[in-house]
Amino acid sequence: MTFPQVLGLRTASPVFHRAGLSDATDRSVRRRLGWVWGLLFLNVLTFTKTPDILPIPSTLGKIITQGALLGALGVALSLNRKMIVRPNGFLLLFTIFAILSLIVSLRGYFGLGSIVRAARLVLFVLVLWLLTPWWGRRDLLFAHIHRRALAVILGSVVLGMMMAPGKSFAQAGGGRLGGAVWPIPPTEVAHFAAVFVGLSVVMWFTGLVSRRSAVIAVIAGVVVLLLTHTRTAVIGLLVGILAAGLSLFFSRKRVRRAFVVTLLVAGIVALSFAPFVTHWFSRGESAQQLSGLNGRAAVWSALVHQPRGEVNIVLGYGMSNDSYNGLSIDSSWLAIYLDQGVVGDVLVAVAMLLILLLALMAPRGPARAIAIFLLVYCLIASYTEVGLGNASGYLLDLTVTMSLLAPWMASGPRRLPFVGSRRPRQPA
């Protein structure tokens, strides 16, 4: 019996249904997949305070975000009523990770909130399992849905900036753009903006979006990203696009031209605006602050050298709120070490290594390039941001990556496989 079957999920056969669906059915399925993904995004937008523009009480905001996960589960079940899943190592590893988190959290080191966070992660992974029958589509459906969801989130940030600029920039000590319509921290805004820009660029490289759409998306996304003053996101974006572009360099003339133009523009900008670029990256901080990563190094050192028993070293303390002694950890790997121990770090590392191996073995093309960008970005950004070890935008990014790398069967469908309770009647 496979692990999905232990969870009560049915395993899909190697060859999916090929029968053609009507356009109405196809649109309905796409629409519901979009709703599931949108609700998952709403769930990861953790409600930390009352928004500056929308007068939503804290309790109601938390009910909305947590209820969005239940809504996503309901829509996913309406789409996949037979609970058919596509076995894959990535979600298997994260399922083990989530169950481990729940078991360790039951020990009560961080109270009831730890159990709630762990249960949420288990439910989140379950919803992702229910979407696996639609992985591996040739139209890269999940990449397009992911990009649209990011556009909506960034649109709310821009709307808040236009309606209340003072409140939008009164984030993280002031001067950094955050969400005013919905309380999104500047680092999360930077994450969404960087991924949105990167997806737009790589999709334009491969002809999946028009030049006009890509230009508008890149300009808007880069402006938002720069206003957040988040250096890690910028570095992850640039390195991710570079890695994705290199995977297409010898097969796409457009990519080679873009690289030449980018190098020329970057050289001119570096020479003409060197003081501005240096000031933006330094953010007015001293050399001592930069070397200490704004205090992160001290928190990391204290966390690593904290006395703990062998069981806690191996399995951690359960799901925390990503802080140590009231200070933000700001590192996915150390947050996982605190919560799930060495075993948790190993599980996540193996999952990302699996994605890397699949990306290296995949044929050149849009799916591989987008997957490489998302993986590289997540690897770099996770160094100074939390999220890999819980239900977050990082897990959604990696899920999109795996959906693009899912192997296609020779007789696989060109349309969405139908997994509802009734099959549509075939045309005469």
Image (spheres, rainbow, N blue to C red):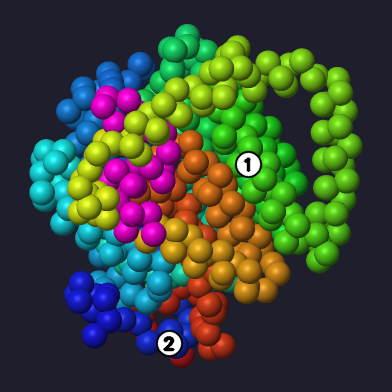
Q: Is residue 423 found left or right of 249 in the rendered image?
A: left
* Coordinates of residue 166 in the picture (x, y in percent): 47, 9
Tag 1 residue: 237
Does any portion of residue 153 appear in the rendered image? no
Image height of 26 relative to 144, above or below: below
**Residue 14 circle label:** 2
User: Farthest residue in the top direction?
Assistant: 166
At x 62%, y 25%, the residue is 226
Image height of 339 relative to 133, above or below: above
Q: Amino acid at mark 1?
A: Leu
* Coordinates of residue 31 in the picture (x, y in percent): 41, 57
In the image, residue 68 lies in the stretch drawn in magenta: no
Give the prevailing secondary structure in the magenta stretch.
helix
Badge 1 density bin: few <14, some 14–19, many ≥20, Cα 10 Å: many
Exactly how many numbered labels are in the figure?
2
Q: Please name whichever residue, 364 or 358, is drawn nearer the observer in this view of the structure.
A: 358
Q: Amino acid at mark 2?
A: Pro
Q: CA distance from mark 2 to mark 1?
A: 36 Å
* Coordinates of residue 416 in the picture (x, y in percent): 46, 73
What segment carries the magenta color?
Answer: 323-346
